[in-house]
Amino acid sequence: MSVTQSARRVSAYEVVHASREFRTLRRRFSEFAVPAVVAFLCWYFLYVCCAAFAPGLMETQVSGDVNVGLCFGVGQFASTFLVTIAHLRWGRRRFDAQSTRLRVRLEQGRRR
Amino acid sequence: MRGILASGVGDPAVNITIFAFFVIVTLIIVVMVSGSNRSTNDYYAGGRNFTGWQNGIAIGGDYLSAASFLGIGGLIALYGYDGFLYSIGFLVGWLLVLLLMAAPLRNTGRYTTADVLDLRLRDTRVRGASAISTMTISLFYLLAQMAGAGALVSLLLGVSGAVGQLVVVAVVGIAMLCYVLVGGMKGTTWVQIIKASILAAGTVIITLWVMTKTGFNFSGLLAHAVGASPDGKAVLGPGLLYGGGASAHFNFVSLALALVLGTAGLPHLIMRLYTVPDAAEARRSVVWTVWLVGIFYLCTLVLGFGAMWLVGDKAILGAPGKSDSAVPLLAYKLGGTLLMGGVAAVAFATILAVVAGLTITASASFAHDVYAGVMRRGNADPRDEVRVARIAALVIGLVAVIGGFLARNIDVAFLVALAFAIAASANLPTVVYSLFWRRFTSRGALWSIYGGLVSSVGLIIISPVVSGSTNPASPSLITDPHVNFAFFPLSNPGIVSIPLAFILGWLGSVTDTVPADNARFARIQVRALTGVGAERSTRG
């Protein structure tokens, strides 16, 4: 591949990158990923810090021999499962179709 | 190799027979499913034809090592709640892979992490650095698994002499090389799928068995466990394993950080994302993995407390392998010789499969990044590349056998946690910056990779896990208390090395004399989110 060819192809990516359609796609990617990552990391480190620095709280009984720490821990599992379900839904409703449409258009444009 | 187990339970002949059966069946399947494996696409990525659920289960097979199966169950059996903390970090870390990495990495890479960095930076120095960190992480993980195999041998096969252990580790190495050399990625993936399925089945069966003993009353199980443990109610709260002074608390936070960020940087998991046809399928595989891994870890909670109750502290600590023996002993208690044989075989199959996955990753990194990318400047013949990968796999297998034999007395969990810390420091920051940060440059990448690698390994060397520890609960490599160069108080470097690697990546980029390339940033982002130009599967 010659230098001019690669330069032309790269600049085509820049045009797409600045297009409104791609910016919408990127916004849709971040609107799920960023809050979800921030939320699960905060929730996880809240749990870690409670386990490290507030063992008394974790040992508070809830029901029978089940205590706050155990519920909190199983809650981490539950939240992880919930985020994966929500993420699949987000992919189906907000992202995949848009992303495929843009890809198909780019590939057709390149072939021409 | 027959002998009486030190713990006096189980029959080594049964254990060996079931394990040999697994090896033979999987080898037949590997020969049947794998084609010629002559192209790089076949050898490294299994032709990219696996479906989401197949790959998701295979990723679970790669992830759930013996450290998970025997290690976490055993930690819960001895320390209760604190063992559970490990499994939460191991699971939650998958969200980072799912939300930020799975689809973009599948869209922008070919076989290795270095491909993604190369698409962004086009710099052989960065490719070389990424290959070095990939191989270092894989090697630490590989040594951990092999060391685990050596320790398991004395527990489950009744082989305690050094020669006997070497023979068994060598057998594991040879079987693993057969998978990798004959099967390539396709064969290895099927081994992972089979192994993950029997591991999950075995775990669920023992879990249900324990639960029937308490009438499916979890609180009742906890009450029994509390009654049986010398620590009493303390096993239900945090602190038995990571309790103590302030340094112990920070040590725990550091470990938690490495666990949650390390998963997303483990090269043998990232490489699996390339075995499916497209990004949506890569995302689906990770979802399957999350469910498999999550349910598995919830079951280990029952296994651990079940072992605490039914086997008891004294029997576990008295057995060879200590906490690692908790789950096999529980199986013996419940189902006798046959169930223990099944668990022993599952444990070996687990090690075998994980080692195969790591070897294929390390050999791919050497052949694709070092040989083809750096030495041949990207102009290698694909057939030569696969040949180099096969030779690399042989060498890595040999190193793993010898290293695993020498490291057989080192704590498995420690080596795995170290691999996670290095992965989170040396691998994760550059991948995140490459995909999402406009001003990222080659200097930033080099500073981050080498800074993360050197700081994480260096801090481990000057930590209490290598020297000068006089605490019998956390043994160190050098047991002589007079040899003490433990200047860094924590046994996990994550809390320092991970932020450092992120900062170095930023600092290197903003001080770089060559400005960041906007066009390449545009290209990687468009490709990451749309999948244009992504590698296709070889058929269909």
Image: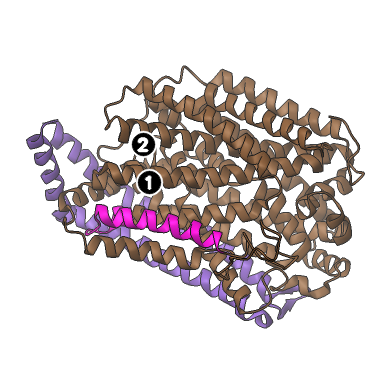
Give the residue type at disc 1: Ser
N-terminal label among 1 and 2: 1
Q: Nearer the viewer, residue B36 or A81?
A: B36
Q: Is residue B130 visible?
A: yes
Q: Position of residue B108 (x, y in %)?
A: 31, 43
> What residue is shown with label 2?
B369
Residue B438 located within the stretch drawn in magenta: yes
> What residue is shown with label 1?
B130
User: Which subunit holds the residue at mark 2?
Assistant: B
With B196 as the anchor, is B215 left or right in this view?
Answer: right
Q: Residue at x 21, y 46 (%)?
A: B523
User: Which subunit holds the residue at mark 1?
Assistant: B
Q: Is residue A90 visible?
A: no
Q: Position of residue A44 (x, y in %)?
A: 52, 69
Q: Which chain is brown?
A: B
Q: Which disc, if any, is residue B388?
A: none
